[in-house]
Image: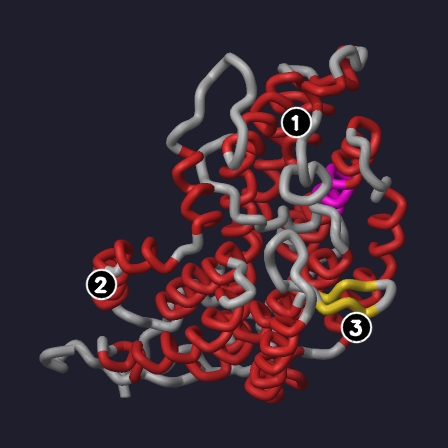
Amino acid sequence: MAGITIGRNVSPTSRSSFSVTGFFSHPSLILLACALGLVVLGLCGIARADQLQTVTPRYERQVVWLIPAAIAFALVVAIPYSRWKRFSDWLFVASLPLLVLVLAMPPRNGARSWIPLGILDFQPSEMAKLTFIMALAHYLMYRDNHRTLRGLVIPFVVMLFPVALILLEPDLGSAMLFIPVLFSMLFVAGARARHLLTVMLLAACLMPLFWQKMNAEQRSRVTALFNQTDGGPAPRGDGYHQHQAKQVIALGGVWGSDFQGQVLEEPAAYHLPAAQTDFVFCMVAERFGLGGSLATVALYAIFLMQGMQISQRCKEPYGRLVAAGVTVLLTTQMIINTGMAVGLLPITGITLPLMSYGGSSLVATSLALAMLVNIDLNGQSEIQSESFMFKDLNAASGN
């Protein structure tokens, strides 16, 4: 059996006492610093939205939600992931009935995505995304069948179960997040790029059928993206949200309202639906200007680099795959959310990790962050052998 090592193997070395250089050699510490910065920026954006919007104040609630999020984070970090990876398949299976149960809940904003639990509205799709990553990583451990085109069938079929249920809510945005996660994890696990490209081309051929299956609201969000106009009165319908989002960003200018001492003169100009959730990035841009926008993007970029470094450093396949999947999941959410805020992507309802208001989203993101930290702490000592030992399939024909 010929060994193929994916990524960079880093031997466990003795760690020096804390210093600036030592800090930057620990991906999990940099990751936590970025997360803290994003949480602070998110709270500032939510507070600004509370000030400008005539809705129920949510800043205090978000601060309260930091407590269960921190507890969830600590619990996951405290237990080495080798102990809970054996339950990955069962956790994924357990998430599917919750996706069925949510379909019986009363709709909210046209979708059945939430299960009311008194003080908390639980969103099953948030947990489904994480358990899918865990189950897929468990399946791909030391397997080589996904290195053939035929072997990609099972991972894609597994993905269809949560995706189909989430589409019934309907929540197209959350369902879309499974796709880049699946492709990235397959690639890290050794799937051939040409096979993945073939699947992408086949999926592209099905886009007209997918368009026909989209409901009227989903199609109108896409068409509104191409009907945007600069200047003039705000459009009606689906184009209004993105028009107002760009308007609020523009009001921040270079330095932001906080530094410019801007006085609120036209409240209508600041009206932005879902300002605390879907468009919290706009509120940060309005409050802190271009600098705040660039700081947000920079923190997420550093987050991405550290997450992928954790994946590369991990010597054990399950941890490496989970780290890659979680990093791609959170980064994709950031790209889609900021893209729709600046009018480059259609509105999907995807929140901004660690920044958007919402207890369910904050706790789920804290769990994802805890997985990365856990893998960074334990991933180099789980096994001593090289990871991802596959059969050499180069001689295989027709695959």
Mark 3 to mark 1: distance in Å? 34 Å
Q: Is residue 346 above or below residue 374?
A: above
Label 1 environment density (alpha carbons within 10 Å; few <14, some 14–19, many ≥20): many
Q: Is residue 39 above or below residue 329?
A: above
Q: Which residue is mark 1?
A: 285
Q: Which residue is mark 2?
A: 202
Give percent across and percent down for residue 23: 70, 49
Give the camera-side residue of 142 and 248. 248
- Magenta residues? 36-42
Q: Amino acid at mark 1?
A: Ala
The mark that comes first in sequence, 3 or 1, is 3
Question: Going by the picture, which residue comes out furthest to the left?
Answer: 397
Q: Is residue 251 above or below residue 167?
A: above
Residue at 47% over, 83% down? 385
Q: Main secondary structure of the magenta part?
A: helix
Q: Indicate left or right for 202 with 113 as reference.
A: left
Which mark is on residue 75? 3
